[in-house]
Amino acid sequence: METQLCAAIRDSVNLASRKPFFLGGLKGYQQLQGIAEGLHPVAGTRGQNEFLQRLTRQVDRCLAQNQTLAVELEETHGWLRKVATCLRYPPSSYSEVEWQKLDSQQVAHDMEVLLKQLRPETENKSILSKFYHALSKRWKDYGPELLHCYDISGLPPHNLQLEGFFNHLRCHQRRVSGCKSTKELRDFGQFQALFMADSQTDLLEQIRRVPLEKYQECRQRLIDSESPRRFIHQLHRDPTKTIYRLLNRYIEHQHELELIPQFANPPPSLCNI
């Protein structure tokens, strides 16, 4: 029992999730409240061991210290749900008739009204104030890009299904090849996606829509954008080898440009690596 109680409390304080505000924060506090409610009747009876009494006091102290924060977090989560309502998310909660009547101008107007209502509520509230500033900044920077799905029929409001599809491809690639790396999918994953076409004619039409030069240009841009992240990853795994490779590329580049004289022998530092 003691082990299970400790595991439950540990799960409450370490609960993590990608969902903002609720899971990992507010739900963990509510879970700890439920544990305290279950401990109080038992810890107050005669004959109970000191462990339960001390555990109850520690849980109560933790709840008291974070009560104000939890109340503010719950209020912020309520405003987050209002934002989701303005964006009509998730779309499955609304009928096709309601979705067809909606347009980007209506959604933009609802969001602007919501931001005006939220601003006076942020006084003396740190979490709600941070939420307001983050929301207003992202709405100003990315808001127009989020509204196309309300004007274009069939355009989803997010790319979660596409990400899930390529995640399925990665899992299949690892299972078939036995390799942890799925680098090949960056080159051939789109062809596996195109094979989901209804017919061979449909598949050929989809392939012909993309010019080869444009595809190669996009592929090169993707490789260039991933280069800094790939370098940092290699540096973490083997810094000596990574720096050695980087210096060799630098020397080769200098030789090609003829900016420095040709080395008769490589630098001593490189020979010693």
Image (cartoon, grey):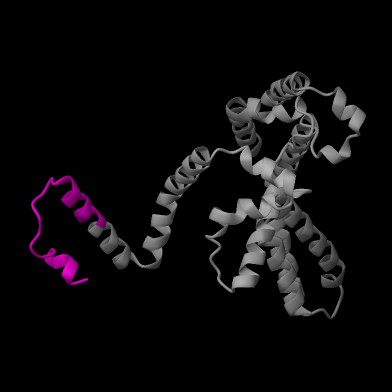
The reply to whether residue 50 is visible in this rendering is: no
Please tell me how many numbered marks the rendered image carries: 0
Looking at the image, which residue is at 72% across and 24% down?
111
Q: Relative to residue 208, is residue 100 drawn left or right?
A: right
Residues rendered magenta in the picture: 249-273
120 to 59, vertically: above or below: above
122 to 210, vertically: above or below: above
The reply to whether residue 248 is visible in this rendering is: yes
Question: From the image, which quarter does the C terminus lie in?
Answer: bottom left
Q: Which of these two is toward me, 21 or 236?
A: 236
Q: Relative to residue 172, is residue 2 drawn left or right?
A: right
Q: Position of residue 131 (x, y in %)?
A: 64, 35
Q: Position of residue 35 (x, y in %)?
A: 80, 64
Question: From the image, which quarter does the N terminus lie in?
Answer: bottom right
Q: Residue furthest front?
A: 201
Does the magenta-highlighted stretch encompass residue 26?
no
Looking at the image, which residue is at 79% across and 22% down?
103
Q: Relative to residue 34, is residue 190 drawn left or right?
A: left
Q: Which of these two is toward me, 43 or 188?
A: 188
Q: Position of residue 152 (x, y in %)?
A: 75, 27
Q: Which of these two is toward me, 159 or 195?
A: 195
Does the magenta-highlighted stretch encompass residue 269?
yes
Looking at the image, which residue is at 82% across and 60% down?
34
192 to 56, vertically: above or below: above
Looking at the image, which residue is at 75% across and 67% down?
56
94 to 270, vertically: above or below: above
Q: Relative to residue 193, is residue 226 drawn left or right?
A: left
